[in-house]
Image (cartoon, rainbow, N blue to C red):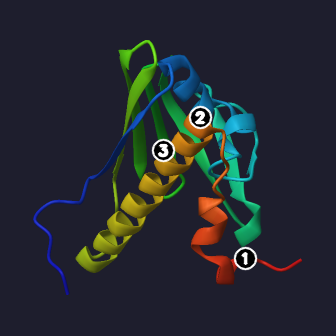
C-alpha cells in the first residue's frame, strides 16, 4: 500500500509547430479533436457548458464541465469524477505553441491515485503526440484506438 504525502499532479507538455490559434482551436472544436482523441462530442467547449465526450470504439464516455475559457491561452475543465484539467497555450512565435496540460484532483487510496496519475500522464502525452502529428504533418495516427485494440467493442 502506497501512502502519499500529497496528491499527485500530472503534467504533459509539447511544442506544436503551429500558431496558437490553430492549436487552441484543435481542443475547442470537436470536428478537429475527434481526429486525435475522442470520437464523438456534444459540442464545442464553451465556458459554463456541460459537454459529453465519447470513445465509441471502447463503448465509454464521460461528461465534463467547462470551468474557464481564455481564448488562445487557457482551458479549464472538470470531469464527472472531480478531477480537473487545465490546458495552457503559450505562443513561442508566429508558428510555435507550447501546450501544457495539468491534471489534478485524483481520489482514492494512494495506490489508486498513483494508478490514475500514471494512466493520465500516458493518456495526455499520447493526445499531445496525436495532435502534433495531425497539425504539423496532417497525419491521423489512431493512437487512442490502437492503444488498447483488445478493448474495442465489437458491433
**Mark 1, other Cα within 10 Å: few <14 / some 14–19 / many ≥20:** some
Distance CA(mark 3)–CA(mark 2): 26 Å
When asked about the image quadrant of residue 134, the answer is top right
* Quarter of the picture holding the N terminus: bottom left
18 in relation to 155, above or below: above
Q: Is residue 146 visible?
A: yes
136 in relation to 18, above or below: below
Q: Is residue 47 visible?
A: no
71 in relation to 44, above or below: above
Element class at badge 2: helix
Q: Residue furthest left?
A: 5
* Quarter of the picture holding the C terminus: bottom right
Residue positioned 38% across, 18% down in the render: 91
**Mark 3, other Cα within 10 Å: few <14 / some 14–19 / many ≥20:** many
Q: Nearer the viewer, residue 122 or 116?
A: 122
Residue positioned 59% across, 34% down in the render: 135
Q: Nearer the viewer, residue 113 or 134?
A: 134
**Mark 2, other Cα within 10 Å: few <14 / some 14–19 / many ≥20:** some
Distance CA(mark 1)–CA(mark 2): 26 Å
- Mark drawn on residue 152: 1
Between disc 3 and disc 1, the foreground one is 1
Distance CA(mark 3)–CA(mark 1): 26 Å
Asked whether, in this view, residue 137 is left or right of residue 60, the answer is left
- Mark drawn on residue 78: 3
Q: Nearer the viewer, residue 71 or 47?
A: 71
Asked whether, in this view, residue 109 is left or right of residue 72, the answer is left
Residue at image mark 2: 135
**Label whose residue precedes the other's in the sequence (3 or 2):** 3
Amino acid at each position: 500500500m502506497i501512502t502519499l504525502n500529497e496528491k499527485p499532479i500530472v503534467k504533459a507538455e509539447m511544442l506544436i509547430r503551429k500558431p496558437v490559434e490553430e492549436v487552441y482551436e484543435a481542443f475547442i472544436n470537436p470536428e478537429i479533436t475527434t481526429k486525435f482523441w475522442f470520437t464523438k462530442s456534444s459540442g464545442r467547449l464553451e465556458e459554463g457548458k456541460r459537454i459529453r465526450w465519447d470513445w465509441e470504439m471502447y463503448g465509454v464516455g464521460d461528461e465534463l464541465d467547462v470551468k474557464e475559457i481564455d481564448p488562445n491561452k487557457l482551458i479549464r475543465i472538470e470531469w464527472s469524477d472531480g478531477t480537473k484539467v487545465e490546458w495552457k497555450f503559450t505562443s513561442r512565435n508566429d508558428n510555435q505553441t507550447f501546450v501544457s496540460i495539468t491534471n489534478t484532483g485524483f481520489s482514492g487510496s494512494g495506490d489508486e491515485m498513483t494508478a490514475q496519475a500514471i494512466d493520465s500522464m500516458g493518456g495526455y502525452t499520447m493526445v499531445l503526440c496525436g495532435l502534433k502529428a495531425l497539425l504539423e504533418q496532417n497525419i491521423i495516427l489512431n493512437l487512442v484506438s490502437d492503444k488498447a485494440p483488445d478493448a474495442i467493442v465489437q458491433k
